[in-house]
Every structure is written in structure tokens, then in C-alpha cells.
Image: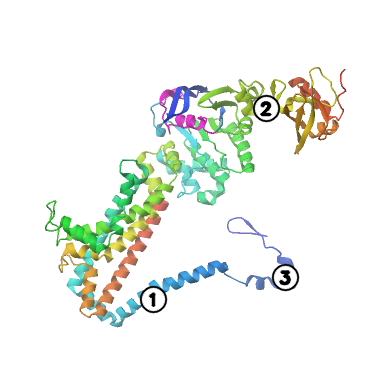
Amino acid sequence: MSLGPGGAVLDEPGAQQVTETRPARKRRSGSRTTLGQGSALGLGIALTWFSLLVLIPLTALVVTAAGGGWAAYLETLSNDQTFAAIRLTVTQAAVVTAVNVVVGTIIAWILVRDSFWGKRALDVVIDVPFALPTIVAGLVLLSLYGPQSPIGVNWANSETAVLLALAFVTLPFVVRTVQPVLEELDHDVEEAAASLGASRATILRRIVLPSLAPAIAAGAALSFARAISEYGSLVLLSGNLPFRTEVVSVRVLSFIEGGNTAAAASLASVMLAIALLVIVALDLVQRRVASRG
Amino acid sequence: MSIEVRGVTKTFGDFVALDNVSVSLPRGQLTALLGPSGGGKSTLLRIIAGLDTADSGSIEIEGVDATRLPAQKRNVGFVFQHYAVFKHLTVARNVAFGLEIRKRSKREVAERVDELLSLVHLSQFAHRLPAQLSGGQRQRMALARALAVEPSVLLLDEPFGALDAKVRKELRDWLRRLHDEVHVTTVFVTHDQEEAMEVADEIVVINDGRIEQVGTPDQLYDEPANDFVMGFLGEVTTLGTVKIRPHDIAVSPTPGLAGAIRGTVDRMLRVGFEVRLNVHTDQGQDVTVRVTRAQARSLGLVEGSEVWLTPAPVGLHAVLVSSMAGATPVPPTP
């Protein structure tokens, strides 16, 4: 018997008899994994699938990009037009993600907590931007906000067009990640906080928000990832003007069409790094908010 | 009086949860609101706490009219059946929550939290998350959290309802002892009459949105105001025309007392120290009788035995039992 780190008594069962017949160490060195047969099979399938779909293509991408060496990277990135495309894409994606975090959470909130006429319809319609083929979304946006706009605005060939298209296709992400968490949220907890004297705002900030933070972060990550890779919905409305409305995906496509695979791959790998960075950053922020209270 | 409820009515659609309920609960007392599920007892508790509002009527807490006060301003501690823990906060920070809201100094908060955690025997768990605690520990934490703000009344809504029988019993005793230490006016809701009778100074029986009876556990048990209270507080059987508790029936192997009713033992079931008899009387009634094991043995009861039943007045019953304990059969009085 010995005291473990938590003050609990750790028992070593049968340690005494074991020393005589066979050494205890040998017994423990058996199987180190806790996986059962079923789980082992599951893990195998998951890893194979993940490798086929994600790891191998990504590695191929990085290898292709690295084929040209640092020189090719620098050349691609120091191109002003490419740099402008990266700046536009990342900025617009960040703005759209920020908007989604706020608006998406509010929409999820009213869908769960309020009852109003047309709530079910709204609940269904939320998914439309996600379900619509992106080029169709682009057409819709062009006809609504393009030169022949029935509402008299012409946002074609402007940065607003990019923002609009991104906002349109990424709308459901935060709503759909936050909604189920909000539904599961125990109403008792808010009442407990109220009876302890917390105002509505304090309850939201210290009790509700920390519970929603992981879901909001997940939705934000999805929304950002989708935004930096979006192509179909914005090509029609944005006009793809170099230095003004050209996004990275369009730039990558034109590299490939020009036969410059190395440049396309290096630009793609830069976007990959940015996406990873943002996802990690969102996770860090989420952890802080979730444990703050 | 610590809590004055006057003429409170509450409806949910067509359903009348509380129908013109008035009750006053004295300071420092531990009161149980007892009744079947859906009888309105939780609704009353929530209205006192300000978590629900009454359609009509008024609530007064410590002499202040609280009818229009929001929950935040009533200074009540509330404990929920399912603990309502802040799961992203450690045990210590859960308890500290109300004090932080009140902007107490860091040192004061830390001292008070230490004090409360040792009161509920959770000091060594201060830095754990609620998910790492058992149900009973979570509920004790919730209690400490509610007590932290020094509420004028402590309200508990089926506080032990989600716990298993053993922990339930422990916590029940513990709550009683805690109340004797802290003396805060406490009201708890339960549908378990044993729990209410064990813990409470006074019981308010609520059924169908109305108060059936208010009294000490003994009063309610011995002098129930009506059939509902009698039936809810303990088992009831009918002997002849009298409603009676199964253990208040005297069993005799011979036609002793006048008015004794003859029957045969249909079924005998031994549960721990007591024996439950199902007696089929000559009038065709099925009467449930409870006797101690010693009684059953000394009377030589078996299934099929012929017995005579009489309602035992409380005093006589006590005499019978004490003589039975000495294993001396009561001689039949001619």
C-alpha cells in the first residue's frame, strides 16, 4: 500500500505471491494498449481513411511546393498580385468569421430560446446556403446585387461582393454548431446564477458563453476554413480583378491554368499553414473563454 | 414569520398548479413541502424564490414584500434537484460565485469559501471540477454555493431526488445536522413522506394545488386532517368500517376483545424485522396487517392461521407490543 499523488491509497494486488512464482514486472509488460479488438479495427479504418483522404494529398502538396525550394516560395509570395490575393482572402475571411460568430450565435439563440411565427421555416432555410451548389449561389447573388439588381445596388466587382458571397455560404456553420449545445444547456444553471444575484448580462458572460465557447470556436473554424477556400459563389459577382477582388482560390486556378504547378502548390501550402494557425488560435481562445467564467 | 405566502394562484394554461394558497413559515425552521408529483409544491417553492411569478397573491420574505422583486434581489439560496453546477468552474469557484457577484474582496471570498467547503466536507476537492464529484458531493457543493451569500431563506427543490437510496439517507441526516448548526430558515420540497418526517420540524402537505394540512410530523401522522393526508403519510388499510394503519391492528389467535373480526391469514411476507400479513376476513375484506417478527412467532402465525383482528388504540397497542417483546403471549380476556 502506498499513497498516490491524489492522496488515494494505491493497492498493488497480489504483489507478494507474484514475486515468488514470476516477477511482477513481467506480468505488467503484457499488452500496453487498452484497445479491444473492435476498437483496434475502428482505429485502423479511421487512420487508413484519414491517410488516403488527408495525409497523403497534403504531403504531396507540401512535397510539390518544396520541389522548387525556398526560392520558388519566395518568388511566388513576393509577387504583388499574389500577396494582394492572400491579404484580401484572409482579411475578408476573418471579417466574415467575426460576423458569423456574433450573428450566428444570435440566430442560434432565437431559434432555441424564442418562439415566433415562422421559426420552423427559418430553421430549415438556414441550411439553404450550405445546400445550394456554390455556382448557383453565385448566380443568385449576381442577379440580386449585380448590375441589374432589382433593389438598386451594384456591388459587382467590389470587395463588398467578396464579403457578401463569403457571408452567404458560411452563414449556417456557427448557427448549426451552437444550436445543439444551446438546446442541451441546463436552464437550472441560469436560474441558479440568478438566485445568487447575477444579472442577465453576467449570466450570459460568465455562465452561458463559457459553455458555448467550444461550439462557437468550432463553427468559427469551419466558417474561416470555408471562407479562405471559397471559389464558386464569388467568381461571378467579384469579377476577379487582380489587386482588387481576386481571391487566393482564383489565383491558384490561374497558376494551374498557366502550367505553374509549383507556384500553385506553394500558394496552397501557405493557405494551409494559415488555416492551421487560425484553427489553433481559435482553440486557444476557446479554452480561455471556457475556463474563465 | 420569515416567509408569508398570501393567496397565491398560478396556472399553466388550463392547469391550476396553485389555487389560492396561503401559508406562513416561521424563522429558523426546517419545513418540508410534501405532496405527490404535479401537486404544486415545486411551483410554490419557485414562486417564493422568484424563479416563477404568481398570477395573483403576494410573497413576503423577512417582512419585505417580495412579490415584484426579481430572483436576484430576494436573497434566497436555491438548490436544484439536478445540482445545476457551473461545470466550467472548479468547486471553489462555484461556491465563490455569489460572493464575486457581490464584489467582496478576494481575501474575504477565499476565507468564506474555505469555511463553507469544510462545512460541507469538500475541502480536499476545492480545485476539482464538478464532473469529478459524485452526485452527493455535487449536491453538497450546490448547498455550500447557496449558503455562501448568507441567504435569508434556503430553498431546496427535491434536493436528494436524483441520488441513490443510501446517499439520500446520509444526506438527509446531514441536512438535519447542518440546519441545527446554521439555523437558516429552510424549506425543502419532497414527495417522500419518510424524508419529510425524518428531517422536517413542520410539514406542509400540498395536493392538487391546495394545502391539505400543516403540522409537525407527529401531528400529521397521528391526527391526519383527511383521508388524503392519512394515506399519503403512511400505509392505510380498512378494517370493518375503520381506516387504520396496518401496524395499529392487534392480532389475537383467539376471539378475545369484543368486536374482534375473524379472518384467515392469506399470505405472510417477511421484510426485515417486520411481517406483513394479508388477512381475509369473514366479511370478505382483505386487510393488511403489520406485526413484528417476534409477535408473529409468539402467536404461531402461519399461512392459513385463524386470527381475530381489533383496531388497537395507540396506548393499548403499545402495551401489546411491549408484552410481546418479552415473548409472553397475551392471555385472552374472556
Q: Amino acid at mark 2?
A: Val
Image quarter where the C terminus of chain B lies is top right
The answer to which of B286 and B222 lies nearer the viewer is B286
| Image location (x, y in percent) of residue B301 | 83, 33
| Image location (x, y in percent) of residue B284 | 74, 26
Question: Which class describes the residues within 10 Å of circle 2: few (<14), some (14-19), or many (20+)?
Answer: some
The correct choice, above or below, for A167 with respect to B17 in the image is below
Residue A95 visible, this orientation: no
* Circles 3 and 2 in contact, beta carbons < 8 Å: no
Residue B170 visible, this orientation: yes
| Image location (x, y in percent) of residue B245 | 70, 26
Q: How is the image coloured?
A: rainbow
Q: Amino acid at mark 1?
A: Ile
Identify residue for label 2. B236
Q: Chain of mark 2?
A: B
Identify residue for label 1. A56
Residue at image position (25%, 81%) is A71
Identify residue for label 3. A19
- Membership of B93 in magenta stretch: no
Q: Which stretch did the figure color magenta?
A: B37-66
